[in-house]
Image (tube, grey):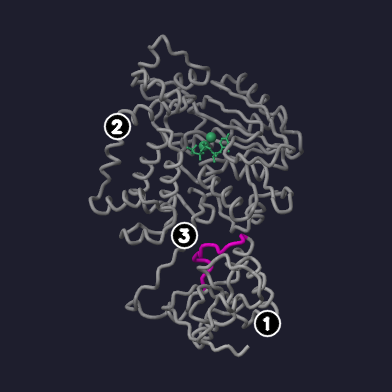
Amino acid sequence: MFESPKRRRPEVTSGSRGHEEVKFRDVTLYLVERRMGKSRRTFLSNLARSKGFCVDDSLSGGVTHVVSEGNAAQDLWMWLEDHGLREAHDTHVLTISWFTESMSAGRPLPVEMRHHIQNPAVERRSSSSPAPKPVSTVSPFACQRRTSLDNHNKNFTDVLEVFAENMDLSGNQGPCLAFRRAASVLKSLPATLRHPEEMKHLPCLGEHSKAIIEEMFECGRSSKAEEILKDERYQTLKLFNSVFGVGLRTAENWFTRGLRTLEQILSDPSIRLNRMQTAGFLFYDDISRPVSRAEAGAMKVLVEDAVKRVNPAAGVCITGGFRRGKDFGHDVDFIIRTPEPGQEDGLLPAIIDRFRRQNVLLYADLQESTFDLGKLPSRRFESMDHFHKCFLIVKLKRDDVCEERERDEDGRRDWRAIRVDLVAPPIERFAYALLGWTGSTLFDRDLRRFARLERGKLLDNHALYDKATKTFLSAETEEDIFSHLGLEFIVPSERNA
Ligand code: CTP
Ligand code: MN
Ligand code: MN
């Protein structure tokens, strides 16, 4: 009871209640009693210990994370400094939100900028004072980062994406994802990287990505990326894969057979294209050209018109890249919202039918719903969703597009072909489908990974399942889903991870 302070080690103190095992040896918590109150502090300390955290009852040198609740930053820092803590100290001073999130996760979460309680006195000190200690404030999960289209590191991310694509085209999904993750972290940064040192504090940058960036700092370019771009195999696979309906296996097969150009594919009598690939070649020039926002808007009018005729109560939302604020896309994605359960049935065939009668349908691949709540949750979170959906190629009349454009140059046809995706989920699944179809793909992937690893929940385009309570969590809006996951809401324009 009257143990000498010199002998006291955090492990001993934390074990004062006896039996809990310390799981996280790198972290020692200290909860500030001021404002929090004694009984809540005891309760929270015990909770943390029961989850394997080490909690020190006093502000010793071993403390790594100070947690405060309800204190103004200035008062808190005065109190901490009175008790011997200095800003230079390598201790995080954090709001209770870091603590509660870590408790729900069952492990100490990476510290983010929003968790920090800054010392106002230090912020006010002159700029000649040494730079504040760097902390990793960037989350390894894209769903905890805000990624607008304003990319300050485009020269780096373009190069990393060449590597990612090269890996993708050779079927190396693991390395591909690693390069995409690295690029995504750089896209979320508020400023351009100025020095290789700055990479030290960033998550998701593997050795390869770091080496590429270092070379770019040294030479202003990446020799390896330039090699890839010149590589015949890379160029050819990329070309073949850019045809609607041509996947990696087909592209690889054609390349292996010595084929190099689209003309060679079309003139090879032994190649039989399927219906999708045929459409892909027929409209290649149009659908390989980016779709503008104005064209997407005109397409929305066309889809809305068809939907209203079938069900006047139904609505149409644009999703995919355009919902994230992009100015151009490779297609236009729509989600159809019907107010009553069951109304989604039969909607897509009726829309396709109307397009056909209007003579604007160039291609349709209709996939009827195979949705069955009884078969959820699915652990294969990469797989496609089960809603009614269709992949279309639709004629868009140039006259329907309100856009400043060169018109009728050299007697070109008065329409262009556009790829359109439609999905029609049941209303009670709408929020999940909207979140999934808005993307970006990496943002969604990390939402699912975060749900599983950090929250013990399974998320996909249909539902969110809580493994602990074995229940599905209902959601009317995207905000509901973020809140079920204990995440700050990220607007679509900040999901460009
Ligand atoms: N998606 C999906 N299920 C499908 C097809 C697509 O969940 N069967 C999702 C994708 O994961 C993505 C979103 O729908 O998040 C949009 O897909 P896509 O059109 O391929 O990408 P965009 O982000 O819209 O990019 P772009 O602007 O180039 O079209
Ligand atoms: Mn899209
Ligand atoms: Mn799409």
Q: Which of labels 2 and 1 is toward the front?
A: 1
Tell which circle, 3 or 2, labels the residue nearer the N-terminal end: 3
**Position of residue 61 measured from the top left corner of the image (x, y, whole percent):** 48, 80
What label does residue 38 carry, if any?
Answer: 1
Say whether residue 115 is magenta. Answer: yes
Is residue 31 depicted above or below 347 in this figure?
A: below
Q: Which of labels 3 and 1 is toward the front?
A: 1
Badge 3 marks a residue whose secondary structure is loop
Q: Is mark 3 within 8 Å of ligand 1?
A: no
The amino acid type found where label 3 is placed reads: Val
Q: CA distance from mark 3 to mark 1?
A: 33 Å
The amino acid type found where label 2 is placed reads: Asp
Q: Quadrant of the N terminus?
A: bottom right
Q: Nearer the viewer, residue 390 or 110?
A: 110
Q: CA distance from mark 3 to mark 2?
A: 35 Å
Badge 2 marks a residue whose secondary structure is loop
Q: What segment carries the magenta color?
A: 105-117
Residue ID at (57%, 28%):
391
Q: Residues within 10 Å of mark 3 (few under 14, many from 20)?
A: many
The amino acid type found where label 1 is placed reads: Lys
Say whether residue 484 is magenta. Answer: no
**Position of residue 138 measured from the top left corner of the image (x, y, whole percent):** 46, 60
For mark 3, what is the residue? 138
Mostly what secondary structure, the magenta segment? Answer: loop
For mark 2, what is the residue? 231
Is residue 251 depicted above or below 454 in this figure?
A: above
Q: Is mark 2 within 8 Å of ligand 1?
A: no
**Position of residue 68 measured from the top left corner of the image (x, y, whole percent):** 58, 76
